[in-house]
Image: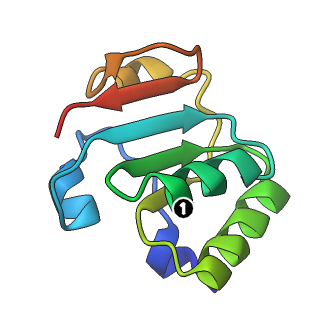
């Protein structure tokens, strides 16, 4: 239902982050966001950043999409896949920063 708004299909190609979000801003990548509560909180409280969340558990993805729609948050895109074998491709477009699961890019 909300996939067309928030969903990010996996691809082996680099993603143009500015086009993805239709604005230049730092991007935070969260791998394994669970039910998405922390990711939603971050997006609501840090509107100057864009967020990408990757989660393999479909119920968590669905819950977060519903919560994002209810909160009318547009600075998040969600990918529903196992990042374990693909994380190095994800990291190649970001620079590592701070916490284990948070990787950011410059705007």
In the drawing, does residue 28 fall left or right of residue 62?
Answer: left
The residue at 56%/49% (across/down) is 42
- Residue to which mark 1 is pinned: 44
| Residue 50 place in picture, x, y as percent | 36, 52
Q: How is the image coloured?
A: rainbow
Judge whether 69 appears above or below 21 on screen: below
Which type of secondary structure does the marked residue at label 1 adopt? helix
Observer-nearest of 9 and 20? 20
Observer-nearest of 50 and 19? 50
Question: Is any part of residue 80 visible from this angle?
Answer: no
Observer-nearest of 85 and 29? 29
Observer-nearest of 20 and 23? 23
The residue at 78%/67% (across/down) is 63
In the drawing, does residue 104 fall left or right of residue 71?
Answer: left
**Label 1 neighbour load within 10 Å: few <14, some 14-19, many 20+:** some
The residue at 67%/44% (across/down) is 55
The residue at 56%/16% (across/down) is 99
Judge whether 11 appears above or below 77 on screen: above
Quadrant location of residue 106? top left
| Residue 16 place in picture, x, y as percent | 18, 50
| Residue 8 place in picture, x, y as percent | 45, 59
Judge whether 97 appears above or below 50 on screen: above
Question: Is any part of residue 34 visible from this angle?
Answer: yes
């Amino acid at each position: 239902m909300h996939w067309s708004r928030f969903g990010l299909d996996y691809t082996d190609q680099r993603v143009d982050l500015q086009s993805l979000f239709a604005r230049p801003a730092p991007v935070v990548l969260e791998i394994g966001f669970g039910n998405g509560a922390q990711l939603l909180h971050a997006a609501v409280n840090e509107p100057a950043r864009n967020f990408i969340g990757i989660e393999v558990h479909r119920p968590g993805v669905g819950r977060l999409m519903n919560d994002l729609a209810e909160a009318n948050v547009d600075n998040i895109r969600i990918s529903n896949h196992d990042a374990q074998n693909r994380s190095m491709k994800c990291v190649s477009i970001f620079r590592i920063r701070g916490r284990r699961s948070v990787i950011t890019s410059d705007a």
